[in-house]
Image (tube, grey):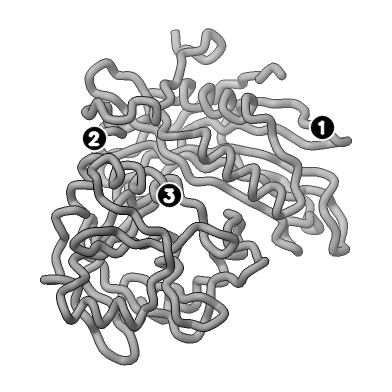
Amino acid sequence: MQISVTRNPNPYPAPTGNYGFGQHFTPHMFIVDWKEGAWRDARIVPYAPFCLDPACKVFHYGQEIFEGMKAYHHKVDGSVHIFRPEMNIERFHRSCDRMCMPRIDSELFLRGLDMLIDIDRDRVPESPDSMYLRPTMIASQRGLGVRASTEYIFFIIIGPVGSYFTGGVNPLKLRVEETFVRSAAGGTGFAKTGGNYSAALLPIKQAQDAGYDNIIWLDAKEMKYVEEMGAMNIMFVYEDRVITSKAGDTILHGVTRDSVGVLLKDMGITWQEKAPAIAQVIEDAHSGKLKEVFACGTAAVVTPVGLIHYKGADHNIGDGGEGKLTRKLRDMLTGIHSGGSPVHPEWLHKVPTFAETAVR
């Protein structure tokens, strides 16, 4: 499928200073429509609001999915690389299947992403900042009634970002959520769909109002085993191993999570995928067996956890600071992102220059 390009005649100035997260977007976006059983009219157009009917199914039944990816500028040659895009595309397809939405061809997905980044290449910030990529699909059919839409819009918007957390890379204070649950077996926990995130807003706000940065989710069945941290995966570092919950139908299959697992194995460190009991985590934190805790995800990469609140009490992790392994893993990943590390070059997809988007 050909992708048409309409340049923005009045591209707004690039932002300067601290980008924050998710506040700035480039002058163009990629769009393709699903109509009459096929994807049609792939195009790059000026970034602008959508005009949608108030009866569109996305507004009433939440039939939508999205992804979170990043592209990085390499100082050595000025090239731009996307980190492990094939994994995000695979995860997007799993979300499509679960939410009863049509898959978009992987080649079209990646080509649209490449061309969009290329046309706004001059907006990709230098390290340690990056370009955040947000592919999204929404149900656009007009009409009420609980059934899958027959029309969809797939679009990609991109923008420069800095640190995900306003305080930068500082140890997080987390509160274990003991009332609400994120997902149950057979649900949508593994899909990147908005309902998973909107349902988390209340408990996260309650934790933040109490002075904590985010929450730790427990399993829905027993409220006993650790699953995730807010919208990120979480890992527990012991002397001889690193433990994290096994990715399944209640837990998001994180790309950074998988990458950390590979790096740990490269270092000869055992990576154990099993849900730790929260009571054991707290006991091990007090005994000193638990050395470090960190969260990981595309937006925040690797972030230390310094304190966990559970059963009405605060429990420090180690000395409350960032652990050595946490720092090493973040440095390894950011080194790969920026092109400064020779490790796992296969994880980087170089964005080509297209004749139809090249700035002349």
Q: Amino acid at mark 3?
A: Gly
Can you see residue 285?
Answer: yes
CA gap, disc 2 to disc 1? 40 Å
Q: Are marks 2 and 1 in contact (CB under 8 Å)?
A: no
Report the quarter where the N terminus lies. top right
The residue lying toward the viewer, choosing from 296 and 44, is 296
The image shows residue 197 at horizontal and vertical percentages of 54, 64
Q: Amino acid at mark 2?
A: Gly
Q: Are marks 2 and 3 in contact (CB under 8 Å)?
A: no
The image shows residue 170 at horizontal and vertical percentages of 20, 61
- Which residue corresponds to mark 2? 335
Q: Earlier in the sequence, mark 3 or mark 1?
A: 3
The dot on residue 22 is 3
Disc 2 or disc 3, which is closer to the eye?
2
Q: Earlier in the sequence, mark 2 or mark 1?
A: 1
Q: Dot 2: what SS?
A: helix
Disc 3 or disc 1, which is closer to the eye?
1
The image shows residue 315 at horizontal and vertical percentages of 22, 81
CA gap, disc 3 to disc 1? 31 Å
Rate crowding at label 3 as few (under 14), some (14 to 19) or many (20 or more) other CA atoms within 10 Å: some
The residue lying toward the viewer, choosing from 42 and 170, is 170
Q: Which quadrant holds residue 132?
A: top left
CA gap, disc 2 to disc 3? 23 Å
Q: Which quadrant holds residue 124?
A: top left
